[in-house]
Amino acid sequence: MKGKAWARLLGLLLVPVCLLSLFSGQVPVSPLGLFQGGWSPLEVNVLWNLRLPRLLLGLGTGAALGASGTVLQGIFGNPLADPGILGVTGGASLGAVVMLLTGLPQKSYWFLPLGAFAGAALASFLVGLLGSRSHDRVKLLLSGVAVSLLCGALTAGLLSFAPDAVMRQYFFWTLGNLGVGTWLQVKLLLPVLVGVLAVLCLWGRQLNVLSLGEEQALSLGMDAPFWRKLLLGWLALLMGLGVCAGGNIGFVGLLVPHCLRLLAGPDHRTLLPLSALGGGLFLVFCDSLGRLLLPGGEIRVGIITALFGAPYFLWLLCRKK
């Protein structure tokens, strides 16, 4: 199947997954209610103010994670690259915590994604600096783990001085949570997310060349260091927005791009938009599954994605040896 065929298939799958997200949760709401006299005021409130923002943020966050994984894998030519594994997500969380401690997000919500962007940019720079010096996949992964551990240690140190309110807010990021999404977040974050994704999708050809390796890219006339830095900067912005919307969610950026590359081919002009669509689809499905598996509550979406992604990651490591 070609890229357009896979895009149509993912688009068709998106419809039932979105319906599953809207009509699953602690408050039972039936889709048939629309044809049986309408929904009650409570059901309308749940659908409009809770589940629809959650669905839209899930689609946006998943798209950001899926596209980020594709960009990282293209930059480093490494199919094991993932924003969570390489510490980019941890950097974004660290930046967000720093902003929460300053209290600036209370004055303007934009300080929160700004801090997350700065943290993700710093982590991306460190990983890019280390990764550009070696094409060894194991060394790249170890560098990412080191950056991730450093960000985690700094975050833990800052939280030891944090008030309870900041601790509660940080708990939102630990395992990912789309359930606190609001229309304010949707209006502020989603347009920027879509804009950044659109820009990245325009650079699929450059990612194709970068994925061949720096020497090959230079021989083809590309300024590889410039494009790597530019793409890492846009990636940091994308991850900063994604972390603010959905928290610290792992393995989406590994699992989705890798599977779609096997199915639809390695051309990033097709793979980038497919990974964005597939990432949104996968994350919304995992979020819905977490609510279905625990009636009356929910399993955090980060746990569900890890249950899918961790075994796949281990299988890839064994397969690449």
Image (spheres, rainbow, N blue to C red):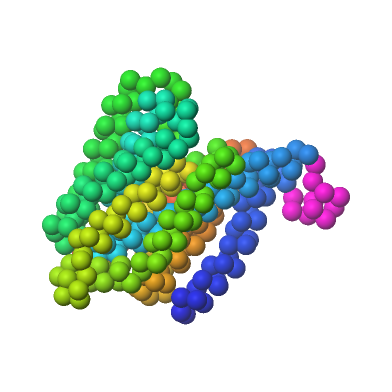
Determine the residue positioned at 33% across, 36% down: 94
Place of residue 282 in the rendered image (x, y in percent of width and height, measured from the top left): 49, 57
Regarding residue 205, the answer to whether it shows in the image is yes
Residue 66: quarter of image = bottom left
Residue 198 image point, x, y percent = 45, 61
Query: Can residue 259 be seen from the camera position used here?
Result: no
Front residue (pair 240, 250): 240
At x 29% / y 54%, what residue is drawn? 232
Question: Who's the residue at 20% across and 76% down the image?
Answer: 220
Question: Residue 63: x percent and y percent?
Answer: 46, 56
Question: Along the horizontal axis of the image, is 280 left or right of 55?
Answer: left
Considering only vertical position in the picture, is 148 above or below 270? Answer: above
Which residue is at the far bottom? Answer: 1
Is the residue 28 above or below the residue 101 in the image?
below
Magenta extent: 30-40
How far across and down, in percent of the image, does residue 84 sit?
Answer: 34, 48
Residue 135: quarter of image: bottom left
User: Quarter holding the C terminus?
Assistant: bottom left
Out of 144 and 321, give the one closest to the viewer: 144
